[in-house]
Amino acid sequence: MWSLTQIPIVQAPMAGSQGPKLCIAVCEAGGLGSIPCAMLTADVLRAQIGEIRAGTGAPFNVNFFAHTPPTADPARDAAWLERLSGYYAEFGIDTAEAAKGPGRAPFDEAMCAVVEETRPPVVSFHFGLPSPDLLARVKATGAQVWSSATTVEEARWLDARGVDAVIAQGREAGGHRGMFLTDDIDAQPGLMALLPQVVDAVRVPVIAAGGIADGRGVAAALMMGASAAQIGTAYLLSPQASTSAVHRAALKAGRDDTTRLTNLFTGRPARGHLNRYLREQGPMNAAAPAFPLATGAITPLRAAAEKQGSGEFSPLWSGEAAPLASEGDAGAFTRRVWNQTRTVVGAVAKQTSA
Amino acid sequence: MWSLTQIPIVQAPMAGSQGPKLCIAVCEAGGLGSIPCAMLTADVLRAQIGEIRAGTGAPFNVNFFAHTPPTADPARDAAWLERLSGYYAEFGIDTAEAAKGPGRAPFDEAMCAVVEETRPPVVSFHFGLPSPDLLARVKATGAQVWSSATTVEEARWLDARGVDAVIAQGREAGGHRGMFLTDDIDAQPGLMALLPQVVDAVRVPVIAAGGIADGRGVAAALMMGASAAQIGTAYLLSPQASTSAVHRAALKAGRDDTTRLTNLFTGRPARGHLNRYLREQGPMNAAAPAFPLATGAITPLRAAAEKQGSGEFSPLWSGEAAPLASEGDAGAFTRRVWNQTRTVVGAVAKQTSA
């Protein structure tokens, strides 16, 4: 039985689209708020945790990436930039303006020091786990450590390394696939199949993620043995999210069949709505630089297109259930989803016990 | 509320792996049994319906394919056979032994006449619906007409044409994708996302399919608004199924991440476990003949390999939840799944009402 928060709903960390505001709203409503930290410096992380603590006394989750940084491959980066050079010409931008550096950093010494100093109640990872010594230091702070599994094999791997909970990330989920023992997106099961198999395979609580956007989905997750449900996309339309205008428009126009897994934006597969960039270059492209280096070449194009009000070169991250999302306050949404969960469970219980 | 059968569980029709025996066992247990008819002649169908009626007084479902037969393309067929000729040499078979003819036929005049004569309670279709006049004749018999939707758009299309129920087929499902308004397998949503969106989109009852193999999955489907749940793969290990030995072995060895969507066996995407044929030629291959003509070239190879006890050239159809399947009587399994459904719903109801 879930006891970490009043409501067994976790707000998914969504890098680039939210910070402490959304986290606080969900925490105050009784769910577990999160902040994405892969694009933050240690100083900004410290400040954001301070902001959360000032805004709520409830538990919260800080989320890090745990990927191995790629080996530099300037020839590949250059070839990719060349491939996109027609877009640069179209927007009147010099390819020399391509962003430098990785953009997203894995959990490291500096971040670990902030965790030790600030002691967040939950520390979650995506793309596996950090090195054993960093992991041990996080656990020594008393934090619960979670990580995402996209297959039963990954769930077992995490369980064996001492995580306190596994997030079973179904293929429906928006944003980056947490996959770390495979790179085959065709082998990523949907949540209906993945969740009960992960529940059977591990000793720790399982949090369900992917395609959940209302109380019906939360209830379904609980039926399959999840201790809690993680909701991401449905929060992106709330005023507490910093979702861009083009991203909000795409979420409102999107359908169940308009998202794709794409590696074009970062080098790793992530789910987002179709746009011109995906149609013309992907959605998957083996030539894209390794994660997170593909980010550099698209950054100026995205900025130029967004300046014109276009999301055709932006990552429009979204799960497959985006059409179920509704605008409105994130806290009220959290409470409403939980009320719907209880109503749905009660109604089906009445039917099936008759 | 489901009133067609005592138990809101539909046994999925599985061509090539079952007939009346499995159907009768499920019907007698209180679920809805089905027979697959795409590979039957009208005479055999008539005999099978007679066998079902002799075995049970309960409602049952006869399932047909509703595809448009392909235009003949001998050059494409020959090129495909040539591509597989190395395997023919390996097994010492002449490519002249490739099977002729389509192997699977769409619902037609002859089958419609059998339906009119035998009046099965439910007639379900895969790949859309037959022509309006054939559909009207089926409806005139008093049969419930169902068909599969793999997207919200397909569900709306079916609803507008007067089906009595929509089967929401999530990406997790084994066997052929029922897709008929799209051929893009990357745009096929998982059941967690698809099911509630289909429930919201149509006026008729929705049956959930894909990744459901036990009472947890059935309970989850009911939470998301399904009137019933369809289970396929989990029945393949029962003694009432005619599943081949190599297929049974693959189902027992399979994992959550070892199925793929492949068009290699028939020309249309279908989910099955990996084997040598998928690894070497696919799993998807744009050169494969159009459905169902790809069947011809693989048939002798499959037979030769199976004679040696090998499933490396056989369609090992399976959903992503195969590891949840258990051997044993199909009727007892049906009752057990429903008991588990009620237990799971009751337990979560107790937790969430507290």
Image (cartoon, coloured by chain):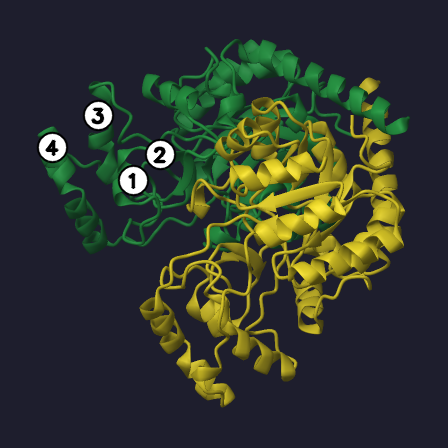
Chain colours: A yellow, B green
Earlier along the polypeptide chain: callout 2 or callout 1?
2
Nearer to us in this view, A207 or A4 = A4
Nearer to us in this view, A336 or B345 = A336
Image marks 3 and 2: residues in contact by CB distance under 8 Å: no
Amino acid type of the residue tagged 4 in the rendering: Glu
Q: At 34% from the left edge and 51% from the top edge, which residue is drawn?
A: B70
Earlier along the polypeptide chain: callout 3 or callout 2?
2
Nearer to us in this view, B244 or A208 = A208
Q: Position of residue B315 (x, y in %)?
A: 34, 32
Earlier along the polypeptide chain: callout 4 or callout 1?
4
Amino acid type of the residue tagged 2 in the rendering: Leu
Q: Position of residue B145 (x, y in %)?
A: 62, 37
Image marks 4 and 2: residues in contact by CB distance under 8 Å: no
Residue where numbered disc 3 is placed:
B305
Earlier along the polypeptide chain: callout 3 or callout 1?
1
For the residue labelled by badge 1, is the local secondary structure a helix, a strand or a loop? helix
Q: Position of residue A242 (x, y in %)?
A: 74, 66
Q: Chain of mark 4?
A: B
Q: At 46% from the left edge and 58% from the top edge, which residue is drawn?
A: A291
Cα separation, mark 3 vs mark 1, equals 16 Å
Earlier along the polypeptide chain: callout 4 or callout 2?
4
